[in-house]
Image (tube, grey):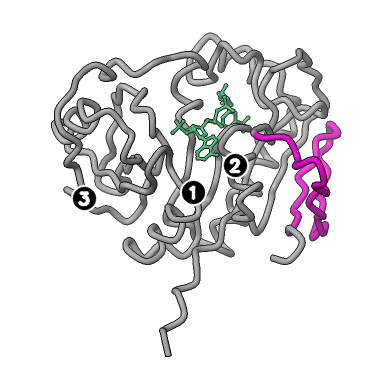
Amino acid sequence: MAAAPPERPRVVLTTLAGVDGRITLRRDQVLLEPSVGERWRAAWPDDVEGLLARRDAWVEEHHAPTATLEGSGTFVVDGTSSPWAQVGGPWDHPDHLPRRAPHWFVVVDGRGRVDWRFTGDDTTALLVLVSRATPPGYLARLRKLGVGWLVCGDERVDLAVAVRRLGGELGVRCVRADGGGGINGALVRAGLVDELHVVTMPVLVGGLGTPTFLDGEPLAPDGVPVRLRVVSVERGAEGSTWTHYELDGA
Ligand SMILES: NC(=O)c1ccc[n+]([C@@H]2O[C@H](COP(=O)([O-])OP(=O)(O)OC[C@H]3O[C@@H](n4cnc5c(N)ncnc54)[C@H](OP(=O)(O)O)[C@@H]3O)[C@@H](O)[C@H]2O)c1
């Protein structure tokens, strides 16, 4: 009898959103850009930082995630193409793990778009998830920077494969998904999210196309919404809330 596949790591999704679900100011700006981040934080009511700190402490205490998962959209705006797209060579780039650290900062960058400045330290190692369609020039760049990658898919990164490999090959038992709506939407559609922690603040951003915490593909024509079970709600003095949900079936 074949052995059962190893259990995949638990995936805990965390986010901070306005009551309209928006998680940033515009689609053509990233929060890592200091002037954008400053305007975003200036809108936070006084109770947000405390709720974020308590949520983070709770996730750490109960799950101690050893991987944080982000999408490339946290680092580059929509429409950014790979600076290495034209740097060719045969595609002969199996997994590359030049270093290990107690914590992994894992980023899906199948199109090879992010020009990394920070690649990790003694406690955290950057790890990039790529596919067999990722430009070889980008992988050469990662190799030069001493950054590792896992090949998880043909045309694009297969998130189910990626999450399992983080567990099976790197020993990760819990992944904290802390990205934007694109990666979050893909994780939910793939049935990979077990638990959700949303800090919602009484702020409106608006704007058609402004990222929300769950974008990605629409429901299938015969699809039904994912049911959530509320585990707990904490309300701050200014009306922000931290809500902890479990996804149906998790
Ligand atoms: N408030 C918050 O808590 C918070 C947190 C994080 C980010 N943000 C903001 O959110 C914005 C980014 O959101 P976004 O939606 O533009 O970017 P995103 O969430 O990073 O979505 C794009 C990423 O998802 C991957 N992806 C999408 N669909 C996929 C699929 N079906 N299979 C595999 N991978 C898939 C893409 O892979 P490829 O790159 O391989 O194509 C890319 O890495 C930024 O403005 C950022 O500042 C806010």
**Dot 1 lies on which element?**
helix
Residue carrying label 2 = 186
Contact flag, marks 2 and 1 (Cβ < 8 Å)? yes
Residue closest to the eye, 64 or 160: 160
Nearest to viewer (mark 3 / mark 1): 1
Position of residue 207 in the picture relative to residue 36 (left or right): right
Q: Which mark is residue 159?
A: 1
How packed is label 1: few (under 14 Cα within 10 Å), some, or many (20 or more)? Answer: some
235 lies left or right of 25? right
Tell me if the residue at label 2 has its CB under 8 Å from ligand 1.
yes
Q: Amino acid at mark 1?
A: Leu
Amino acid type at image mark 3: Leu
Mark 3 vs 1, N-terminal side:
3
Residue at the image point whose x is 57% and y is 11% from the top: 28
Q: Are marks 3 and 1 in contact (CB under 8 Å)?
A: no
Depth order, front residue of 54/245: 245
- Going by the numbered disc 2, the residue's amino acid type is Ala
Secondary structure under tag 3 reads loop
Please give the label number shown on residue 7: none
Q: Nearer the viewer, residue 80 or 223?
A: 223
Residue name at image x 39 percent, y 16 percent: 81
Residue 169 percent coordinates (x, y)? 32, 63
Question: In the drawing, does residue 108 fall left or right of residue 55?
Answer: left
Q: Quadrant of the C terminus?
A: bottom right
For label 1, being within 8 Å of ligand 1 is answered yes
- Residue 229 % position (x, y): 82, 59
* Secondary element at image label 2: helix
Q: Nearer the viewer, residue 34 or 21?
A: 21
Magenta residues, as a range? Answer: 217-246
Return the residue at label 3: 97
Please report the residue visible at 46 percent of the width from the left and 80 percent of the height from the top: 4
Q: Residue at x 82, y 57 (%)?
A: 230
